[in-house]
């Protein structure tokens, strides 16, 4: 922030709020209905604007200096009064910036805010800049504690994939098998799976088809990509291919597997990101 001349960052992405403070709350909902939970970061101070009625969830976090009730300024919450709600949001945030940083115009980094709020802050005299670049660059710096968190998230995801592998039975649907991974991730206090990439047989190519109600047939190949936001909010992403059984893989399946495995050894493996 100092290097880029940013006086305040206003984070609305639930993943970035989790990263900056360790707190989490209704991550998918608040990402879809923004801004309804947001974090104000200024030099040496953080103010978490928590969703109404959830202020107690930040108790005990030394990364949060103050908790205030958020002003939800999405059309889902405000309906026809959205402009009025946005004006209130802008007034409250402008007052806070001037209380914390002094009178005058301030450079405020925004992410994932609706246009009315951003335009309102600019009209109130603040310079609004995109916060994505500085946030991503600071997230690229990993402490030893973060490396431990990444290892924990990968270990949880590996256990979840192992449980999925053990649960493979011809006759179940792709969705039923994919649900095993979700169950293990949530049971292990991970956050969620970002995608639903699990396919069997002919649906494994082309890739990027979502899991479906299609029944997994005997001896088909099953391919998956984890895309797990796991322990402590850290990403754990890797791909696996399994055989459904009950027979041994065919000669052609073994040839294709060897071909894919050989090509993977010439590239870098998937990495985890916070």
Image (tube, rainbow, N blue to C red):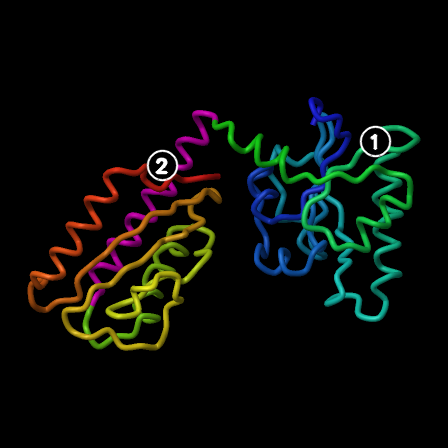
Categorize mark 2 by other alpha carbons within 10 Å: few (<14), some (14-19), many (20+).
some
Q: Which residue is mark 2?
A: 151
Q: Quadrant of residue 148?
A: top left
- Give the residue displayed 7% in from the left and 61% down from the top: 251
In the structure shown, which secondary structural element does the residue marked by tag 1 occupy? Answer: helix
Which range is magenta? Answer: 143-168
What percent of the width, then of the height, locates residue 72?
75, 57
Magenta region's main secondary structure?
helix
What percent of the width, then of the height, locates residue 20?
59, 37
Quadrant where the N terminus is found in the figure = top right
Categorize mark 1 by other alpha carbons within 10 Å: few (<14), some (14-19), many (20+).
some
In the rendered image of this protein, does residue 192 appear above or below residue 235?
Answer: below
Total numbered circles: 2
What percent of the width, then of the height, locates residue 66?
72, 38
The disc placed on residue 100 is 1
In the structure shown, which secondary structural element does the residue marked by tag 2 occupy? Answer: helix
In the rendered image of this protein, does residue 259 appear above or below residue 223?
Answer: above
Is 243 in front, or is 54? 243
In the rendered image of this protein, does residue 77 appear above or below residue 186?
Answer: below
Can residue 47 be seen? no
């Amino acid at each position: 922030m100092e290097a880029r001349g940013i006086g305040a960052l206003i984070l609305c992405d639930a993943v970035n709020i989790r990263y900056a403070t360790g707190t989490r709350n209704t991550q998918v909902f608040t990402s879809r209905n923004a801004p309804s939970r947001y974090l104000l970061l200024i030099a040496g101070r953080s103010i978490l604007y928590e969703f109404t009625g959830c202020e107690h969830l930040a108790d005990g976090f030394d990364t949060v200096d103050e908790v205030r009730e958020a002003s939800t300024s999405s059309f889902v919450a405000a309906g026809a009064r959205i402009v009025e709600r946005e004006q209130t949001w802008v007034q409250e945030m402008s007052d806070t910036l001037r209380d914390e940083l002094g009178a005058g115009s301030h450079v405020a980094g925004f992410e994932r805010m609706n246009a009315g709020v951003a335009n309102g802050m600019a009209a109130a005299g603040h310079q609004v800049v995109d916060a994505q670049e500085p946030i991503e660059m600071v997230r690229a710096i990993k402490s030893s504690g973060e490396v431990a968190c990444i290892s924990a998230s990968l270990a949880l995801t590996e256990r979840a994939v192992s449980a999925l592998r053990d649960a493979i039975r011809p006759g179940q649907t792709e969705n039923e098998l994919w649900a095993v991974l979700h169950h293990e991730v949530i049971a292990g206090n991970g956050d969620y799976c970002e995608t639903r990439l699990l396919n069997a047989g002919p649906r494994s190519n082309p890739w990027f088809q979502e899991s479906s109600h299609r029944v997994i047939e005997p001896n088909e190949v099953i391919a998956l990509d984890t895309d797990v936001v796991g322990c402590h909010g850290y990403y754990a992403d890797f791909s696996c291919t399994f055989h459904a059984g009950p027979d041994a893989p065919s000669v052609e399946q073994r040839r294709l597997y060897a071909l894919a495995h050989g090509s993977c050894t010439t590239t870098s493996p998937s990495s985890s990101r916070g």
